[in-house]
Amino acid sequence: MIGVAASSSPKVAILVAGVAGMVAGAMSMAVGEYVSVSSQRDAEQADIGLKKNELAIDPQAELQELAIIYIKRGLEEKLAMQIAKQLSAHNQLGAHMRDELGLEQASLSRPLQAAWISAVSFAAFALVPIIALLIAPENLRIPMIAVFSLVSLAVLGALGGHLGGAKLGRAALRVTFGGALAMTVTAGIGRVLGEYMNYSQ
């Protein structure tokens, strides 16, 4: 949007660019997330399928394998075998999924869920510069789009830092600097192309 605005395009052109970018970006994020999580889901299902076959072929060896896992965690051999037997009697596959494969049924990958969450998240924050455009006076379009966008980036960066246990200031600064650099380059390209188009006419 800043690139289009820097080319001295009318408000409607900037708005179209913003909405098109929002839709394209949301769809791109959704497809990318779907493909990525689907690959993860395929790997999980392959591991589960392999474990089902192993349990069907040699359940005693799999029971011993489960007990060994508990022994490595510090349990005595006898107790480890008792726990392995009890868990296997309750849910044999579930015990191996959890303690051998590190998988929980409730937390298995869900490609469609990941895709729509990614798309909605992108679209929600892509509305920020569009709102800035709609409320900005003509002479303040670029500054307001930039400020609104940079503030939202800083908030997202700080939130990401908080969730990841990093320093909020550093995380926010990193994202904000990257956004500012991208806006500067985009604005420069838009201005150059705008001047070229005006000159060629």
Image (cartoon, helix red, strand yellow):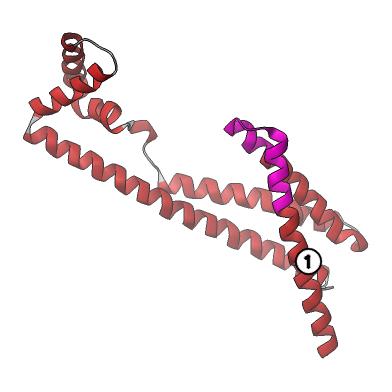
Q: Is residue 100 above or below residue 130?
A: above
Side of 64 where 162 appears, left or right: right
Q: Residue 35 at x, y = what percent?
A: 42, 55
State left or right for residue 60 relative to residue 176: left
Residue 1 appears in view = no
Q: Residue at x 31, y 48 (%)?
A: 42
Residue drawn at x 73%, y 50% as measured from the top left: 177
Residue that carries the numbered disc 1 in the rendered image: 187
**Which amino acid does the dot numbered 1 rest on?**
Ala
Which sits in the foreground, 131 or 200?
Answer: 200
Residue 150 covered by magenta stretch = no
Left or right: where 67 falls relative to 192:
left
The residue sitting at 71% across, 53% down in the picture is 179
Query: Residue 201 location in percent, x, y?
Result: 83, 90
* Residue 102 position in % (x across, y down): 32, 31
Classed neighbour count for the residue bearing mark 1: other residues with Cα under 10 Å, few (<14), some (14–19), many (≥20): many
> Is the residue 182 above or below the residue 44 in the image?
below
Front residue of 185/83: it is 185
Residue toward you, 174 or 115: 174
Q: Quadrant of residue 136?
A: bottom right
Q: Quadrant of residue 105?
A: top left
Residue 121 in view here: yes
When the figure is inspected, residue 96 is found, relative to residue 136, above or below; the finding is: above
* Residue numbers of the magenta segment: 158-178
Q: In x, y percent, where is residue 36?
A: 42, 52
